[in-house]
Image (cartoon, rainbow, N blue to C red):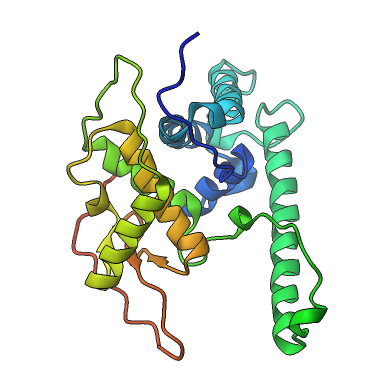
Amino acid sequence: METPIYRVQLDIFSGPLDLLLYLVRRSELDVLDLPVARITEQFNDMLNVIEFIDLDLAGDFVMMASSLTEIKSRLELPRADELPEDEHPLGDDDPRSELIERLIEYKRFKDAANQLEERAAEWQDRYPRLADDRPRTSKDPASDRIKEVELWDLVSALGRVLRHKEVEQQTKIRYDETPVAVYVDRIGSQVRREGEVKFSTLFEGENERSRIVGLFLAVLELLRHHHFRAEQPSEYGEIWIRPPLESGEAPPPPATDVTQPDESPP
């Protein structure tokens, strides 16, 4: 049995419904009248990036992509009322009904969870416990949220990088023995030295799949656990990686992204 070329153990994806909700919000779509053809295309673009990062993580996303394709096909079948897709009322016979209900329910729970999280953070600031009184927790630090830029924004940015890069197709078993910590130290030092670094420039000159994945995971590590910041001044534009703020330091003004964003980002 062949051994995988590399292994990525990272539970960073919240699931296909989270990605769907992100795509709906990013494109300012009406969730009650979901444009399935458009969403399916965007979802498949993001799926390609997820499969690139780790094929084992993509199972649930592949199933959702199949469901979207099926719904899209059913919507294109002739209907008795002969209305175009965007004019179909959302009824029991609408192929989108079940998906939209699941998406609305997921959004409701996610909004409630975010409100509880914000309230907990607010009360912790008002009534901090003494260090010895704080209860021990087994919370996985990998579940921390990226504040300035969403995880899916970074995945989308990686997709734009890959579109302009020819990644080597490895035909034999190879191991990349470079620990992610090495990439973390290298990128962290560069960002601290330069003050801000474009996300896309971190991958310049890299065409080996395992190294690209290692660099991407290092960026996530810096943002989640080392207080580095990621900011995106313009929609679909460049993402800037910045060092942690010093105590009492005000954040600098956002960089002006003079690059032209792609018209059809993943």
Q: Position of residue 34 (x, y in %)?
A: 58, 40
* Left or right placement of residue 168 versus residue 70 in this view: left
Q: Quadrant of residue 127?
A: bottom right
Q: Residue furthest top?
A: 1
In-front residue for pair 110/59: 59
- The residue drawn where x is 29% and y is 37% is 162
Q: Position of residue 172 (x, y in %)?
A: 31, 15
- The residue drawn where x is 35% and y is 41% is 178
Above-or-below relation of 209 to 178:
above
Above-or-below relation of 9 to 201:
above
Residue 68 seen in the figure = no
- The residue drawn where x is 75% and y is 54% is 109
Counting labels gives 0
* Left or right placement of residue 223 versus residue 143 in this view: left
- The residue drawn where x is 58% and y is 26% is 59
Residue 29 seen in the figure = yes
Q: Position of residue 246 (x, y in %)?
A: 41, 84
Q: Quadrant of residue 164?
A: top left
In-front residue for pair 218/252: 218
Q: Quadrant of the C terminus?
A: top left
In-front residue for pair 244/46: 244
* Left or right placement of residue 141 versus residue 252 in this view: right
Q: Position of residue 216 (x, y in %)?
A: 38, 47
Above-or-below relation of 246 to 64:
below
Q: Quadrant of residue 220?
A: bottom left
